[in-house]
Amino acid sequence: MKIQLKINMNAKLFLRDPEQSELGKKIILHSIQLIHKNGFEAFTFKKLAIDIGTTEAGIYRYFENKHRLLIYLTAWYWSWLEYQVTFQTNNIKDPAVKLKRVIKLLATTVEDDNSTLYVNEGILHQIIISEGTKAYLTKRVSEDNKDHLFKPYKDLCAVIGNMILECNPEYKYPKSLASTIIEMAHFQNFFMNNLPSLTDFGHDKNETEIVIFLEDLVFSSIKNFK
């Protein structure tokens, strides 16, 4: 029997919970595919409706607009990633080894999780890399923040920040370093594949080098802090 992972989502992200119907699940599945294929700017509910074989009005019953759908997808991914971080570090006692495991999770290709049937995490990870910042780099960020729409991202940063403090309880900037690790892992991956002159990894396109770079950055910051 397969175990299906259920992510609890903020009800303010949607008008109707997409996980409660087949159409809703198709909206999530096909929106991930279309955004990955064509980019968020070119993505529209009209194109999504055609791809699914439904009406545009039917999609608007679930999400207010495409930006709210993007926030939903990013929030879902951060919640899923927090689960993976917790699960994969649960039995690790050494805080340094634990933090290295997290860095590897952030900086390497994500495999599709069979416990989530209508979400391809591998594709969604690529969307997070290329489109994820568009969820909060908006004029509405303060209003959206008041509705706790970014809580999954904050929760993940808090988990990683606590791991940093396990390595050095005196370190003063655990949240800043945690968010830096996440964003830099994504930026370096994006630069490596699209703007290689901005990285040292553009020639070989080796994710392992990004992991090594981030480990050096993180542990140098923690160990050298006074």
Image (tube, grey):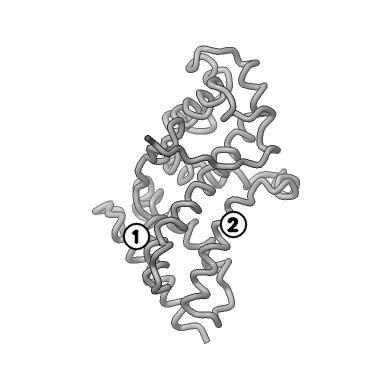
Residue, x 44% and y 36% (percent of image)? 116
Residue 196: x %, y % from top left: 34, 52
Q: Is residue 79 above or below residue 214?
A: above
Residue 149: x %, y % from top left: 66, 45
Quarter assignment of residue 64: top right
First in sequence: mark 1 vs mark 2: 2
Q: Is residue 108 above or below residue 42?
A: below
**Which residue does the numbered mark 1 point to in the structure image?**
210
Residue 31: x %, y % from top left: 50, 28
Q: Is residue 188 above or below residue 212?
A: above
Q: Give the class, few, some or many, for how many residues have Cα within 10 Å of label 2's Cα (few <14, many ≥20).
A: some
**Which residue does the numbered mark 2 point to in the structure image?**
155
Residue, x 54% and y 80% (percent of image)? 169
Q: Secondary structure at mark 1?
A: helix
Q: Nearer the viewer, residue 72 or 212?
A: 72
Residue type at numbered disc 2? Asp
Residue type at numbered disc 1? Ile
Q: Quadrant of the N terminus?
A: top left
Residue, x 55% and y 60% (percent of image)? 157
Q: Secondary structure at mark 2?
A: helix
**Contact (Cβ within 8 Å) of mark 1 with mark 2:** no
Quarter assignment of residue 188: bottom left
3D distance between C-alphas at marks 1 and 2: 24 Å
